[in-house]
Amino acid sequence: MTAVSTEPARGRRRWMLLLPLLVFLGIAGLFLYRLGAGDPSALPSALIGRPAPATELPGIAGLERDGKPVPGLTAADFKGAVTVFNVWASWCVPCREEAPLLMRLAEDKRIRILGLNYKDEARNALQFLARYGNPYAATGADLRGRAGIEWGVYGVPETFVIARDGTIAYKLVGPITERNLDSVLRPEIEKALAKGS
């Protein structure tokens, strides 16, 4: 009787056990490479160069400035001036971090800042603005998120730069930071201001 070697069979079993692990590590490595291979805020938008969606939204109930209600949004709000349009919510942690930068932007009288309060309750939105400041000349309450869909919102916060003619010039996905404010957002605002002046 001849002894049959089991060594090749064991080697194949080891490879069969290691194969799923190697495939997983390869996919994870590719994912991590793609994640770090660019600016996540530079996601493309089909709206760039197109007219801003005709947005008609009521204001946030109870929101006032100087004893008068802060208005909601109308389609006309997106024409006539360079506009920074910010999508925000009280439940959004990065929105809290970008709030001081929006207040700083609001000091620039050459631009108008509008807001879209996304899927938020009025009392929470009021508390947020009381705590962090209200940079918005007008802000619409998008309770169901319908306007967010029309604007192609991926998540909150997002910020758009809209030219005087009402076309979308730029979209920033994610929060405004010290870094992207000076390196990206302000230059895009300046481009929009220079266009048609």
Image: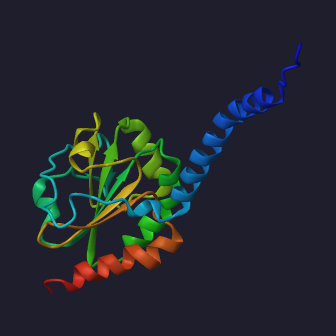
Identify whether 192 is placed above or below 21.
below
The one nearer the camera, 49 or 32, is: 32
Which residue is at a point 12% across and 61% down the rendered structure image?
Answer: 51
- Residue 39: x %, y % from top left: 47, 65
Q: Residue at x 29, y 40 (%)?
A: 61
- Residue 42 appearing in the image: yes
User: Along the horizontal axis of the image, is 83 left or right of 33?
Assistant: left
Residue at 31% over, 42% down: 62
Q: Residue at x 28, y 42 (%)?
A: 141
Lateral position of residue 31 relative to residue 54, left or right: right
Tell me where residue 113 appears, x and y as whole percent. Answer: 30, 65
**Which quarter of the picture shows residue 135?**
bottom left
Task: Indicate whether 154 appears above or below 191.
Answer: above
- The quarter of the rendered structure image containing the N terminus is top right
What is the image's colouring?
rainbow
* In front of the other: 124 or 49: 49
- Nearer to us in this view, 187 or 142: 187
Q: Position of residue 64 (x, y in %)?
A: 31, 51
Q: Horizontal placement of 54 versus 140: left or right? A: left
Q: Residue furthest top?
A: 1
Instruction: Identify the image quadrant of the C terminus.
Output: bottom left
51 with respect to 15 (left or right): left
Residue 59 in view in this figure: no
For the residue pair 167 and 70, the one nearer the viewer reads as 167
